[in-house]
Image (cartoon, rainbow, N blue to C red):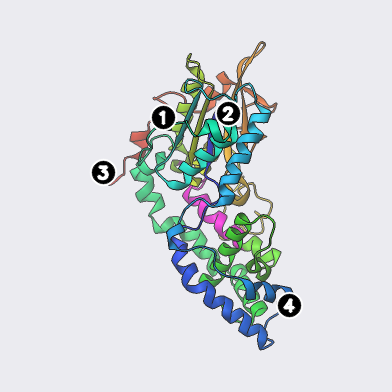
Amino acid sequence: MWLVVRHGTRYPGKKHVKPMIKKLPKLKKKIVQSNNQNNSELSHDTIEKFNKWTLSFDEKQTMILANEGENELIDLAERMQSRFPNILVDNYDPELYKFKYTATQRTEKSAQSFVLGLFGQYHSANITFPKPEQKDPILRFYKRCERWRTEIDKNPETYKEKELFIKSETFQKVVSDISQRLGLKLDYESVNLIYLICAFETAWNKTGKSPWCDTLSLDNMKVLEFMEDLEYYWVDGYGHQLNYNQACPALRDMFTFFDSNDKSLVTAYFTHSGTILKMLSILGIGKETNPLTHESFLSHKDRNWKVSLIDAFASNIAFVLYDCKVQGPSVLVLHQERPVQISGCPPEALCPLSIMKKHLPDTEQECQFDAMCTSSKET
């Protein structure tokens, strides 16, 4: 089994932590005051929840794995082990298992939680992991792709569709809708913070409901979700070929693992959203017939590219090799623990390894990473 896993639920990143800490407590006060002046449409229960609400993190916790994130990885390991007991054996042997994480606390803690789920408290304590690389060529290949970083990730043009959507009538109606519900005049930034804190508090606490989510209707959520999907589509997904072509080193690593004759049963990598989305795209998962644009909200209501589903915290892609008597070595591909059909493979669950190699890059010649990632400014 070759497995790549996004880290579990974490606290917000640098970009959002400061505005959240600075603005959300003030916004909460304004919401309660507006209600006291009979200007809001929120229910008594929601206002009671707001009265009790406090921000549950500080700057020190930026990007740190949350407790819920640890539990997600423990549970994932236990589920996968019960499904594949002959592969994910419960006795740790360094010749059978290869674990690796990136140079971040959230992937390190995710890896530790996963092995805790596999081997239990006592045995998992003795497992050593390889030293993480700052720009790992397999786990975080995009950090080494200078052309992607300059021409796509840091290029304002990449975010044009998202920005045009924010200015659209559809989006501005959401801003005025939420403003009316709260009895306040809100701007895009405030609405976006509400959406983000609703999402994070839902991820941190699966049983309770965040009061911030009560300020958004289901229709509001759909528009805000599309805004987010638009950004990821162009930065990490099908919007640019380079986004997903650069994921070829990860696929080559998977093919090399399956072709090797050593005893190894499992390679498990703990990584990030950027890796998962680019890999899903090179595999043809979450693909749309037409590209997502600022004008396509209505035509993409039932889209496959929904980042909240395909790339949630602890999202995972697994390749499981079977030795089939009739069709030879074949691979079961799982996304979020469910079988998926990938580009070029027959509709039945198992894809012959030979067919996968025909449709996906498995050789150095088919994966010219340095050539594709050399910035045009350097050539």
Amino acid type at circle 3 is: Glu
Q: Position of residue 180 (x, y in %)?
A: 65, 79
The range drawn in magenta is 224-241
Is most of the magenta stretch helix, strand or loop? helix
* Residue at image location 33% in from the left, 35% down from the top: 371
The quadrant of the image that shows the N terminus is top right
User: Can I make out residue 105 in this image?
Assistant: yes
* Residue at image location 43% in from the left, 23% down from the top: 363
Please state which of the two labelled residues, at mark 4 or mark 1, is closer to the viewer.
4
Comes first in the chain, label 4 or label 2: 4
Which residue bears the numbered disc 4? 44
Q: CA distance from mark 3 to mark 1?
A: 20 Å
Comes first in the chain, label 3 or label 2: 2
Give neighbour class at mark 1: few <14, some 14-19, many 20+ (Cα, 10 Å).
some
Q: CA distance from mark 4 to mark 1?
A: 59 Å
Comes first in the chain, label 2 or label 1: 2
Q: CA distance from mark 4 to mark 3?
A: 61 Å
Which residue bears the numbered disc 1? 367
Which residue bears the numbered disc 3? 378
Q: Position of residue 358 (x, y in %)?
A: 53, 23
Label of residue 319 in the image? 2
Task: Identify the secondary structure beneath mark 2.
Answer: strand
